[in-house]
């Protein structure tokens, strides 16, 4: 008896993909040593700045407040996300073939996109923290308890991990008919587009995740609307808003614009855009927030800046 599977002709291009080729660097290889030199300078600077802020906040009890704990979480997340991209990127700049294993590709997808989602979640809880601090100051310590802060930190990490785990599982079930990814790193939609069959389930779950995190953005902007209304009534509140909320707002705008561009371009973008422009926009959320966040928070927030300066000058004086 001939079964239905036996009657179907095999797909000519179907194969087991063991590795992917990343083609994002193909048009810029003549400048690869320049890019490698810049990355060699930039990545250690990112690590240094983020580690400095983390160590400063952990070391000084004066900074064991919710706002600073969330800033520390942003910096830890930056170290996590950049570790999923920069070492491989630096290796590719020196290699002739830009290949990544199937498993390595899935791990990179998990790390980079859970980093991005964790960034948005952390900025969301920071927005709520500022809203409570400025609009409901008398209730602040009863609302922002240590227990609640710990719960929100766990939420910032576990929710992205859960979403990306499901997306990775859905991706592993796809049969692929290609192995070339037109980016500098593995991207989940780029892998899904290589599927020989329908990716409807992946698309539906992916869009659901996007809508959930767009909801995070709505909550953030609602918080800022309330903050701005409050600022109109008091000069003191306005000063507090400028000092603590403007850095957060800059981080938020940068992350949301970069992440939305990356998602929308991956799904609907035109190949007519120059490769160099596509590369920069794909890298923007891995390039700007990890270096911008520790700098703007470390320089703008007086308490953090003073502790950093005290820490370094104390070490210098001891060495002298």
Image: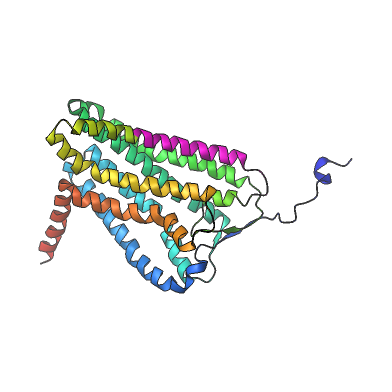
Direction from residue 288 to residue 66 in the image, left or right: left
The C terminus appears in which quarter of the rendering? bottom left
The magenta span reads: 196-219
Direction from residue 224 to residue 275 in the image, left or right: right
Q: Residue furthest front?
A: 272
Image height check: is 316 above or below 128? below
Give residue 238's position: percent from left, percent from top: 16, 37
Name which residue lies at 42% across and 59% down. Answer: 280
Direction from residue 127 to residue 21 in the image, left or right: right
What secondary structure prevails in the magenta region?
helix
Q: Is residue 315 magenta?
A: no
Q: Residue furthest right?
A: 1
Name which residue lies at 24% across and 35% down. Answer: 130
- Residue 294 visible from this viewpoint: yes
Residue 51, by quadrant, is bottom left
- Residue 55 visible from this viewpoint: no
Q: Exactly how many numbered labels are in the figure?
A: 0
Say which of 58 and 25 sits in front. Answer: 25
Name which residue lies at 35% across and 51% down. Answer: 78
Say which of 15 and 253 sits in front. Answer: 253
Give residue 212's position: percent from left, percent from top: 45, 35
Name which residue lies at 21% across and 51% down. Answer: 298
Type of colouring: rainbow
Give residue 1's position: percent from left, percent from top: 89, 40
Say which of 12 and 58 sits in front. Answer: 12
Give residue 169's position: percent from left, percent from top: 57, 43
Image height check: is 8 above or below 92? above
């Amino acid at each position: 008896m001939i079964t239905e599977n036996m009657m179907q002709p095999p797909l000519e291009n179907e194969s087991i993909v063991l590795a992917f080729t990343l083609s994002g660097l193909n048009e810029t290889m003549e400048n690869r040593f320049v890019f490698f030199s810049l990355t060699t300078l930039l990545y250690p600077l990112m690590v240094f700045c983020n580690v400095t802020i983390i160590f400063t906040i952990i070391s000084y009890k004066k900074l064991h407040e919710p706002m600073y704990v969330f800033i520390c979480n942003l910096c830890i997340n930056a170290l996590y996300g950049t570790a999923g991209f920069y070492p491989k990127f630096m290796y590719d700049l020196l290699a002739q073939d830009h290949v990544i294993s199937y498993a390595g590709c899935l791990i990179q997808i998990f790390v980079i996109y859970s980093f991005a989602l964790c960034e948005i979640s952390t900025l969301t809880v920071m927005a709520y923290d500022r809203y409570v601090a400025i609009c409901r100051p008398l209730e602040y310590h009863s609302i922002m308890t240590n227990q609640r802060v710990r719960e929100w930190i766990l939420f910032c990490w576990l929710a992205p991990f859960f979403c990306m785990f499901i997306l990775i599982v859905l991706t592993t079930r796809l049969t692929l008919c290609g192995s070339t990814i037109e980016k500098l790193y593995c991207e989940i939609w780029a892998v899904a587009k290589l599927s020989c069959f329908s990716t409807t389930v992946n698309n539906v779950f992916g869009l659901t995740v996007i809508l959930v995190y767009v909801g995070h953005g709505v909550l953030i902007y609602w918080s800022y609307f309330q903050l701005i209304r409050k600022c109109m009534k008091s000069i003191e509140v306005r000063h507090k808003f400028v000092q603590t909320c403007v850095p957060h707002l800059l981080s938020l705008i940068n992350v949301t614009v970069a992440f939305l561009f990356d998602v929308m371009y991956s799904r609907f973008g035109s190949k007519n855009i120059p490769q160099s422009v596509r590369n920069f926009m794909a890298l923007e959320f891995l390039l700007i927030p990890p270096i911008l966040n520790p700098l703007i928070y470390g320089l703008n927030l007086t308490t953090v800046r003073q502790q950093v300066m005290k820490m370094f000058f104390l070490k210098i004086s001891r060495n002298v």
